[in-house]
Image (tube, rainbow, N blue to C red):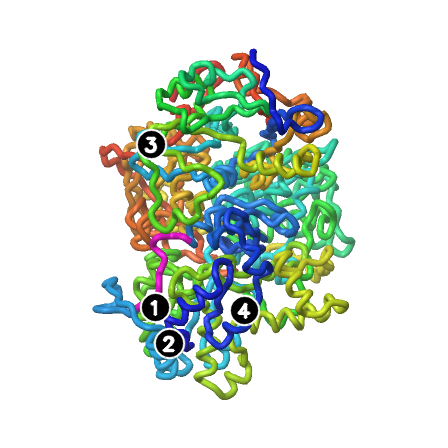
């Protein structure tokens, strides 16, 4: 394996970004979903395209109904790219559009992507979304678009980036100041908006970060971890 | 009001991105409010401005990220005591209100008959003259229906309307009037309380949708997270009592599917058990009174009425009274009945029984911010709006004014509120969108969007907070701040009116209010310094507020059954209308992000649906996604069926928010408005519309609908039993 030499490597070794999602706090309010749309220039699909299953939600709330009336209950689970340590989407990409960054992100290089959709097929979490049509915003809705994030064009696969634009911004600031990014200094849009603080983001290589401490909780599990994907997201079970 | 379009553009050019513009030209020389001088605005570098979110009535603090003069993202303000840096889906989507393609871009005047929907642009000068001449023609006949605007704008409105001897009604459908009425009767306090969820150990909620749309959802969402997992050794328990398993109930440890309208009775049953088992923590003088009240009920009868078994009631009573910090709250479906106020009083009585008033984890009434002149905006109930019908009939020469208010959509057609519009001599709307009510206006003088406006917001109930809102972008269109319009009319009217409202524009008035206010709070600073600091912070908030002492500890007047419209034989189903997560009562329907936000329970996007218990549906032979007709004595609607295991078998539930006949391209003609089904049933104690008091029946149409579900599992609401997948 070729050693990746990062000239901007942070003092004390690389970061490993990860997330903890406490299902006992999540209420399914979907603040994260809209926050993600706003931050990441996610296109509006419209009723017609959504009915074909083409709506894009980098983070979505899944619901699991159990039991019958009067014992019916529903459980929510926010699902986003798990940024797997051993990601099934990466080796299948013929053009290396889907690759792993040194700090543990499962990244997608849009201008390499040729749209074969192998990665989407191989992702057990179905969190990769294909652009079946050119994105469009009725004017002047486009004035809201975040200049830090690319608008993905037709024929390209896209997915959650853990708001890489924010991570890179914080890393550069820290780099200039000759320090590591502090715990809580950078949060993806979903984590930032979550009213119940169900989502926590941070560096897993820092043993004292909230993410590292919370992921040791007895309630912790990884989504479909039996597949050996080594997800970067630890879910904490809901108590019921 | 002599700012011409040309001057407007000049100023726009001169002040560059990030500057702002009041409505009056005289003030343009004194533009200073932006905290960063222009030379610091660097392309590609974001500026952040603190303001107040106005997408619902909670008034969360926000920080808006502005780049190159465009608002890009809205975040919660981390220091604001209401939302502590968090923000909901609707707050996030406020940008799609600002940049909505269907915003009204300038003043319009009706052409053709009223309601025909034809308008032509007019100049601000002509528009203002028409408005003023109509006001002068109809002395004493002016009525302003405004959304509650607690703060300086409320003071401006009330002073103005008082001077012209008009009527001012602050109205919003989600204003929780029944809760205010119940608290007034139970505790003798006219304030909304702070429920200390974060420190509660046992939360018993009767229908209160506090995780989706009740009072201050982000505030209570935050507290809920802490209640569950914020304490090292305690996890608060949470029981939700309501006929439909709502988004809030989904997070509960236990859901109690009660018969609609009997929530108050259950509260009484629980209270009775607490008293009988000797667990009440009552003040000495109250015991006799409480024992007398509760002994009049039979627990078996309560069990039969509520359909909650006797053992279940006892279990709830023990859980509640044995908890270290119990709390009972009520709202939503429990308040949406003709006995809503009494129900909420019965729930209040549970809190009295366990003595949690002012205690950690209980109910606290906190003194709101002091030092603002009469800037409260007490919302009125639906009954007060309906009383306008008589007023307009008598007056026959009245001027109806609307500010951020769409009563024609929010009130069921059975209330005949349309008559108010028909009888009005002149209708003026200051709304930003062509909604149902604005479409019937004679004159439209659109306000700036809230992200383009000055303003303040006094939060009630939580830590004493006065949010300060500033424009974060240059006004996009030829709109004008409503405060400026009223102040300029005050000047034209002159005399006493001008004396009482002497300010040149709304920003000046706001600054002066804050000057008086800050003079008492921050004595060691100059006003300019304090003002800039408040703008940067997003307002003023103090330490914990003073507790307001409770002057009364009353029991419900009566515990009577709820009344329902419709014969149960002909109309076998109860009806529950609920606010959808994204669209709420319909205000969110013109924001594509919210239309495309999957309903958390069913994953439906871009439309309406009807929820039926799967067993009931099968009895009727109704397939999932089949279009069904829901019929009440007052109207009917058609929408696709979604099997909903969280409904009582005798309950039909339908989300609110769709079925607009106007309100822009994303909202108009989409889905159905279930309010058309409702009978004009009112809770007499609070005057609120009882949205749960209409019975319905269903008919098959045999047609298959096309509801759009975006559930990744493809299972919708079908159950997932252990081991078996998606069997219906």
Counting from the top left corner in percent of width and height, residue B417 is at 35, 63
User: Is residue B102 found inside the magenta-colored segment of the image?
Assistant: yes
Q: Earlier in the sequence, mark 4 or mark 1?
A: 4
The numbered mark 1 sits on a residue in which chain?
A: B
User: Is B313 rendered above or below residue B365?
Assistant: above
Which residue of the protein is positioned furthest toward the left in this rendering?
Answer: B112
Determine whether the residue tagged by mark 4 lies in a helix, strand or loop.
loop
Marks 3 and 4: same chain?
A: no
Residue matched to label 1: B107
User: Is B413 rendered above or below residue A167?
Assistant: below
Residue matched to label 4: B31
| Front in this rendered view, residue B302 or B187 | B187
Marks 2 and 3: same chain?
A: no
The residue at 38%/43% (across/down) is B595
**Which numbered disc, 4 or 1, marks the residue closer to the eye?**
4
Q: How many residues crowd mark 1 within 10 Å: few (<14), some (14–19), many (20+)? A: many
| Front in this rendered view, residue B581 or B383 | B581
**Which portion, as a residue range, is magenta?**
B99-108
Residue matched to label 3: A154
Residue B553: quarter of image = bottom right
Determine whether the residue tagged by mark 3 lies in a helix, strand or loop.
loop
User: Is B212 rendered above or below residue A236?
Assistant: below
Q: Which mark is residue B128?
A: 2
Residues at discs 2 and 3 in contact (Cβ within 8 Å): no
């Amino acid at each position: 394996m070729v050693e990746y030499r990062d000239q901007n490597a942070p003092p004390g070794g690389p970061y490993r970004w990860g997330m903890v999602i406490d299902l006992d706090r999540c209420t399914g309010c979907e603040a994260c979903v809209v926050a993600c749309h706003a931050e990441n220039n996610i296109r509006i699909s419209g009723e017609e395209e959504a009915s074909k299953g083409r709506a894009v939600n980098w983070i979505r709330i899944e619901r699991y109904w159990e039991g019958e009336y009067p014992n019916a209950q529903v459980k929510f689970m926010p699902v986003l790219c798990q940024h797997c340590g051993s990601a099934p989407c990466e080796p299948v990409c013929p053009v290396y559009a889907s690759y792993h960054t040194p700090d543990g992100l499962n990244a997608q290089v849009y201008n390499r992507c040729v749209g074969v959709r192998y990665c989407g097929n191989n992702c057990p979490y179905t969190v990769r979304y294909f652009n079946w049509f050119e994105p469009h915003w009725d004017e002047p809705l486009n004035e809201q678009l975040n200049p830090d994030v690319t608008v993905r064009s037709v024929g390209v696969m896209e997915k959650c980036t853990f708001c890489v634009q924010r991570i890179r911004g914080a890393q550069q600031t820290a780099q200039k100041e000759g320090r590591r990014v502090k715990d809580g200094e950078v949060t993806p849009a979903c984590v930032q908006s979550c009213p119940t603080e169900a989502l926590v983001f941070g560096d897993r290589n820092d043993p004292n970060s909230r993410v590292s401490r919370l992921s040791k909780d007895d309630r912790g599990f990884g989504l479909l971890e039996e597949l050996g994907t080594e997800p970067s997201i630890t879910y904490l079970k809901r108590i019921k | 009001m002599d700012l011409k379009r040309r001057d407007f553009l000049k100023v726009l050019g001169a002040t560059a991105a990030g500057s702002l513009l009041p409505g009056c030209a005289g003030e343009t020389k004194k533009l200073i409010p932006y905290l960063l001088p222009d030379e610091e605005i660097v392309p590609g570098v974001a500026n952040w401005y603190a303001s107040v979110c106005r997408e619902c009535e909670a008034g969360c603090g926000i920080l808006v990220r502005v780049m190159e003069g465009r608002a890009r993202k809205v975040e919660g303000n981390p220091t604001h005591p209401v939302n502590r840096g968090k923000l909901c889906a609707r707050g996030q989507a406020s940008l799609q209100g600002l940049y909505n393609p269907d915003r009204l871009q300038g003043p319009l005047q009706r052409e053709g008959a009223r309601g025909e929907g034809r308008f032509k642009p007019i100049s601000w000068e002509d528009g203002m003259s028409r408005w003023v001449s109509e006001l002068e023609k109809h002395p004493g006949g002016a009525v302003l229906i405004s959304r509650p605007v607690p703060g300086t704008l409320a003071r401006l409105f009330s002073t103005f309307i008082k001077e012209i001897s008009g009527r001012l009604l602050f109205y919003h459908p989600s204003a929780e009037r029944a809760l205010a009425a119940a608290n007034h009767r139970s505790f003798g306090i006219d304030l909304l309380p702070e429920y200390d969820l974060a420190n509660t150990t046992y939360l018993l909620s009767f229908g209160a949708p506090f995780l989706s749309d009740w009072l201050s959802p982000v505030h209570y969402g935050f507290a809920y997270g802490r209640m569950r997992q914020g304490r090292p050794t305690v996890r608060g328990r949470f029981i939700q009592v309501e006929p439909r398993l709502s988004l809030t109930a989904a997070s509960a440890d236990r859901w109690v599917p009660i018969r609609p309208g009997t929530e108050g009775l259950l509260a009484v049953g629980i209270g009775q058990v607490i008293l009988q088992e000797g667990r009440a923590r009552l003040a000495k003088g109250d015991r006799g009174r409480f024992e007398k009240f509760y002994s009049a009920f039979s627990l078996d009868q309560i069990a039969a009425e509520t359909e909650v078994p006797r053992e279940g009631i006892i279990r709830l009573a023990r859980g509640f009274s044995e908890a270290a910090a119990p709390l009972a709250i009520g709202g939503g479906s429990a308040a949406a009945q003709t006995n809503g106020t009494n129900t909420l009083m019965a729930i209040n009585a549970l809190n009295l029984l366990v003595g949690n008033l002012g205690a950690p984890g209980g109910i606290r009434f906190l003194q709101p911010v002091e030092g603002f002149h009469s800037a409260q905006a007490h919302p009125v109930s639906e009954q007060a709006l309906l009383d306008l019908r008589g007023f307009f009939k008598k007056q026959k020469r009245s001027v109806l004014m609307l500010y951020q208010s769409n009563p024609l959509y929010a009130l069921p057609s059975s209330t005949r509120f349309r008559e108010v519009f028909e009888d009005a001599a002149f209708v003026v709307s200051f709304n930003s969108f062509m909604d149902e009510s604005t479409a019937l206006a004679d004159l439209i003088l659109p306000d700036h969007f809230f992200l383009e406006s000055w303003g303040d917001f006094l939060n009630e109930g939580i830590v004493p907070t006065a949010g300060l809102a500033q424009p974060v972008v240059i006004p996009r269109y030829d709109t004008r701040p409503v405060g400026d319009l009223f102040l300029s009319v005050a000047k034209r009217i002159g005399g006493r009116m001008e004396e009482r409202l002497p300010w040149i524009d709304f920003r000046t008035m706001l600054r002066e209010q804050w000057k008086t206010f800050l003079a008492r709070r921050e004595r060691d600073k100059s006003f300019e310094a304090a003002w800039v600091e408040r703008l940067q912070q997003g307002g003023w908030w103090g330490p914990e507020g003073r507790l307001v002492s409770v002057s009364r500890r009353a029991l419900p007047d009566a515990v009577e059954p709820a009344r329902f419209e419709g014969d149960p034989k002909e109309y076998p189903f109860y009806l529950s209308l609920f606010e959808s997560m994204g669209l709420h009562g319909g205000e969110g329907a013109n924001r594509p992000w919210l239309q495309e936000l999957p309903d958390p329970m069913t994953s439906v996007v871009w439309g309406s649906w009807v929820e039926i218990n799967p067993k009931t549906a099968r009895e009727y032979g109704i397939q999932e996604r089949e279009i069904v007709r829901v019929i009440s004595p007052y109207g009917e609607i058609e929408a696709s069926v979604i099997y909903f295991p969280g409904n009582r078998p005798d309950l039909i539930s339908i989300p609110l928010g769709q079925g607009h006949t106007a309100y822009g391209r994303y909202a108009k003609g989409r889905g159905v408005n279930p309010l058309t089904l409702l009978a004009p049933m009112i809770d007499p104690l609070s005057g609120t519309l009882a949205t749960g008091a209409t019975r319905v029946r269903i008919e098959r149409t045999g047609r298959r609908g096309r509801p759009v579900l975006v559930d990744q599992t493809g299972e919708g609401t079908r159950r997932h039993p252990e081991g078996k997948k998606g069997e219906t």
